[in-house]
Structure formats: structure tokens, C-alpha cells
Image (cartoon, grey):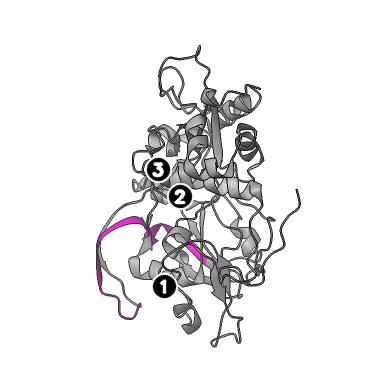
Amino acid sequence: MSHPRRGRDRGRGEGRSEPSREVAVSKALSYILRHAAEREGVKIDSHGYANVADVLAWRKLKSLKVTLPEILNAVSTSDKQRFGLLYNPPHQTTSSSPPPPSTDSSGQDISATASTQTTAQALAANDPEPTHYLIRATQGHSIKTVEAASLLQKLSLSAESSDDASNPPLPDTVVHGTYHAAWPSILAYGGLRCMSRNHIHFATGPALSSVLPKGRGGPVAVMPPARGAGGVISGMRADAQILIYIDLKRALEAGVPFWRSENGVILSEGVDLGVSGVSGVEGEGEVSGRKGVGMEFFDVVVERTNGLGVLWDREQGGLVQETPDWMLKAKNLKGGAGRRGGGQRKGRGGGGAPRLRVEGPLEMIEANDI
């Protein structure tokens, strides 16, 4: 199937190219399984599973005349392993909600590898009956009835001293990718928040040593704006402009919950941050009712597209660079989904700055709609 040409001005109507059918199917699946199943009348259980027959009957996929092979293809070809599949023929169970592949028969957590194997087994079933399959998004949910404990593997400090294969070691890197427009809000809030999602999303790379190859005091390895599908990282958009590295052990010791999805994304719903007045952010007063991952668990924050380098460093006591004026004025995406952006950077300290075209309103971007 041929790939459509990129439009010159995506998001403004003119010249906008339509996604390929494969991309349209994948996006529709992500939408219904992450966000819209309940309000669209598609039954979804606490493990995040929906019957493939029900998903195919959903109005959007029905209008596209999507077939079971296309669903299976979306699962098998997803670059970020966005979907999990369970083969559930009638003779295996009489329950409408079978035990999820994240638990064994005793209800104990098993590894994400086992969930991946379950998906592989389902893809190999060669059964043409859609009702015999259950599908779920591996992470990114805003549906509140989907329970983290049923879908994800909880991270624990005990994994560091355990030889249990079902309790793999903690990742060396936990990093949240965000954009210029979001950084002033993160400072004002005092940390990361879930926004409209159930969890904040983190990736396990790139390693800090690859972003700051000469150490925290050295220059940043500038990343040009991402184009195409290269550099795929589960848990973060490839074009993230700012990387927030988390001190995972410090956060876990303080009781901040972290989870691992079956496709390797690290997630956290955060904790109550209390009430705080944030200094150094003009016009910001007290913020109440805050929940998230607080800045006390940030290790280092790096801007990697304009060459600013380290913005915040716990080893240096916090903020090490005042937020430049152009970043304070970076476009805040609001409202509907659409691609917006524009402008080219006109100077090191002011004027304009690149605002990469990204999908979704800011609250969805900050939570990494991946």
C-alpha cells in the first residue's frame, strides 16, 4: 500500500494528507480502547479488555469496514506494541472476563514477557472468529474503571535483590518527554501530573549519558526535529523537546507508585503533593489539591532541541536556567486534537523558537498519547 505524501501545513486544512488505512485503524483502536469504550457502548473490563467482535461493531470501525485480519495486523505491526491480544475460545472459559495474562491462576503477578507471549500465541491462533479474541491497549488509558493492578506490573525496590524472573530489575533510566510550552506549567505546578489520563508516562531511554555525553556540565547532544517513524521509544514521543529524568529509587522510597506496562512503558499516577507556592514563576501563587510526581524526584531536566542543555539539576539545588522568554510564550495547544505549531527560531535568546507539530491538546501531550 502506498504511503501518502506529507501535507505542507497539516492541521490548517489545506494540503493535509490523510493517514494510511493502517494508521487510521491503529488510531481508532487506540481511541476506543484507551478513552471511549464506555461512552461508545463497547464493553470493557477492569483489565482493559474488550471483545474484538464488539470493537469491530463500533461505529467508526464499522464505517471503515475493518476486518479481523486488519485488527490482528494492527496488533502485530505496532511499533510501540500498543495493543495486547488474548485468544479466548469458548471451550477455555465460560466467564466473560477471563483471568488476564498479567496474573497466573493464583492471581500473582507474572512478567510482562508472559503478556507478550500471550499476544504472540493469540496472533498464531489462526481462528477467523472475532468473538474468540479479546484486545486491550497496553497503556495510556483515561477510562477510570480500568485498574492499574489488573493491567500493569508494580515496580518495587525489592526487585534489586531478587532473583525472581517475574520481578525484573528496575530500569536504569526513567524519563518523561515533554515540550517547550509545558515546561513553565510543570515549574508552576511543582511536578508532573496525569492531566486527563490515569497515569503519567515515562520511557526507559534515552540514557542521560547519550544526551549529555560529556556530563551534566557539558553541552547537550542536540536532537533535530523528528521526522517519520525513526527513533521510536515506547513511553515518549520521538520529537520531545525537554527530557525530565526521574530518580526512581528515591521516588519509590518515598512511596510514589510506579508501574511497568507489557510494552515496557513506565507509568505513575503520582501522590498527593499538598499545597505549595511555587517561587521563581511570575504570576503563580498557591496551587492546591495537587497530585503527581513532584520535582523533588526529578534528577535532571534537559532541553535538547535548541541546545539549552540542563534546565534543572537536583545536584545543583534545582533550577539552573531561568526559563527564556520565547519558551514562556511558546504556543499552548488547547481545545481539539489537530496539529498546530510553527515558527522558526530566530535567535539564541529571544524572538521565535521552533514549536514542533504535535498531536493533541496540551493535556494529552503532557501525558504522552503514545
Q: Main secondary structure of the magenta part?
A: strand
Q: Nearer the viewer, residue 363 or 9?
A: 9
Q: Name the quadrant containing residue 351.
A: bottom right
Q: Secondary structure at mark 1?
A: helix
Q: Secondary structure at mark 2?
A: helix
Q: Secondary structure at mark 3?
A: loop
Asked if the residue under mark 1 is in contact with the one under mark 2, i.e. CB atoms within 8 Å, the reply is no
Q: Is residue 292 magenta?
A: yes
Q: Horizontal placement of 19 versus 316: left or right?
A: right
Label 3 to label 1: alpha-carbon separation = 36 Å
Which residues are the magenta region? 281-301
Q: Nearer the viewer, residue 136 or 241?
A: 136
- The circle on residue 40 is 3
Residue occupying image coordinates x 41% and y 41%? 37
Identify residue for label 2. Answer: 248
Which of pointers 3 and 1 indicates the residue nearer the eye? 3
Q: In the figure, 143 relative to 350: above or below?
A: above
Where is residue 20 shown, x and y percent of the image?
66, 52
Q: Amino acid at mark 2?
A: Leu
Is tag 2's residue or tag 1's residue first in the polypeptide sequence? 1
Is tag 3's residue or tag 1's residue first in the polypeptide sequence? 3
Q: In the figure, 123 relative to 77: above or below?
A: above
Label 2 to label 1: alpha-carbon separation = 23 Å
- The circle on residue 115 is none
Identify residue for label 1. Answer: 184
Q: Amino acid at mark 3?
A: Glu
Label 2 to label 3: alpha-carbon separation = 37 Å
